[in-house]
Image (tube, grey):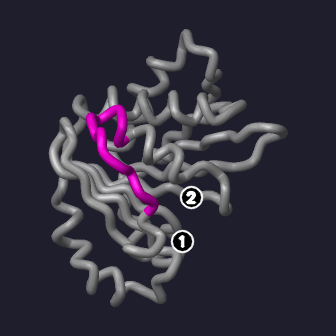
């Protein structure tokens, strides 16, 4: 069964708050964690990833992996890999990036997972960012027990916060 948490993200600061909250929850769940970030161009995928990485202690530049395909960072939870699959043609190109090796890290974030759906379907957590009025909405889909732990932790964090959770 998939657990879903919906959050209203009225502005960029709310997206950054979600990234910080993820950093709070991640050390409490089993690792490694595979998270996919879905959404149209400009939906906030990189903003969310950047806020998460900052909250995990990254102080240097946090670059979008659009052209490099993989950016790796040392964080408080260990090495984190941020990937962008937008320019990939299929699973064989994911394997060429040594995704299996990268997947052993404490956290892997993948933007544009729909380019390689067979691999993306193995994610623990899918974060879907969508336009919602002047802001955004986030739907977090827990696909594994690890993902459910993350969603449960976030639901507790946002119970009393301005970002209002709702469940389906």
Going 75% across and 47% down the picture, which residue do you hit? 131
Q: Could you tell whether 165 is left or right of 86 in the image?
A: right
Depth check, front residue: 96 or 12: 12
- Measured as percent of width and height from the top left, residue 91 is found at 38, 84
Residue at the spot of label 1: 114
* Position of the C terminus by quadrant: top right
Residue at the spot of label 2: 38
Going 23% across and 63% down the picture, which residue do you hit? 103
Tell me if residue 54 is in the magenta stretch: yes
- Residue 74 lies, with reference to residue 95, above or below; the image says above
- Measured as percent of width and height from the top left, residue 162 is found at 63, 16
Q: Is residue 134 visible?
A: yes
Q: Are marks 1 and 2 in contact (CB under 8 Å)?
A: yes
Which span of residues is magenta-colored? 53-64
Instruction: Of the two numbered discs 1 and 2 on the same chain, state the one appearing first in sequence.
Output: 2
Quadrant of res 122? bottom left
Tell me if residue 99 is in the magenta stretch: no
Depth check, front residue: 137 or 82: 82
How much space separates mark 1 and mark 2, taking CA atoms?
Answer: 8 Å
Q: Residues within 10 Å of mark 2 (few under 14, many from 20)?
A: many
SS at circle 1: helix
SS at circle 2: strand
- Measured as percent of width and height from the top left, residue 129 is found at 62, 49
- Measured as percent of width and height from the top left, residue 6 is found at 62, 35
Going 54% across and 71% down the picture, which residue do you hit? 114
């Amino acid at each position: 069964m998939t657990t879903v948490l919906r959050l209203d993200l009225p502005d960029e600061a709310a997206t950054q708050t979600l990234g910080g909250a993820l950093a709070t929850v991640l050390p409490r769940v089993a690792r490694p964690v595979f998270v996919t970030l879905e959404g149209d161009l400009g939906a906030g995928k990189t903003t969310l990833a950047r806020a998460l990485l900052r909250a995990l202690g990254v102080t240097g530049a946090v670059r979008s992996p659009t052209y490099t395909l993989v950016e790796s960072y040392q964080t408080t939870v260990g090495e984190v890999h941020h990937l962008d699959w937008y320019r990939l043609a299929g699973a064989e190109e994911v394997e060429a990036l040594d995704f299996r090796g990268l997947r052993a890290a404490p956290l892997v974030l993948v933007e544009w997972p729909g380019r390689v759906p067979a691999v993306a379907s193995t994610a623990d957590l899918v974060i879907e960012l969508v336009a919602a009025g002047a802001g955004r909405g986030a739907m977090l889909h827990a696909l594994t027990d690890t993902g459910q732990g993350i969603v449960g932790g976030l639901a507790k964090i946002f119970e009393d916060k301005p970002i209002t959770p709702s469940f389906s």
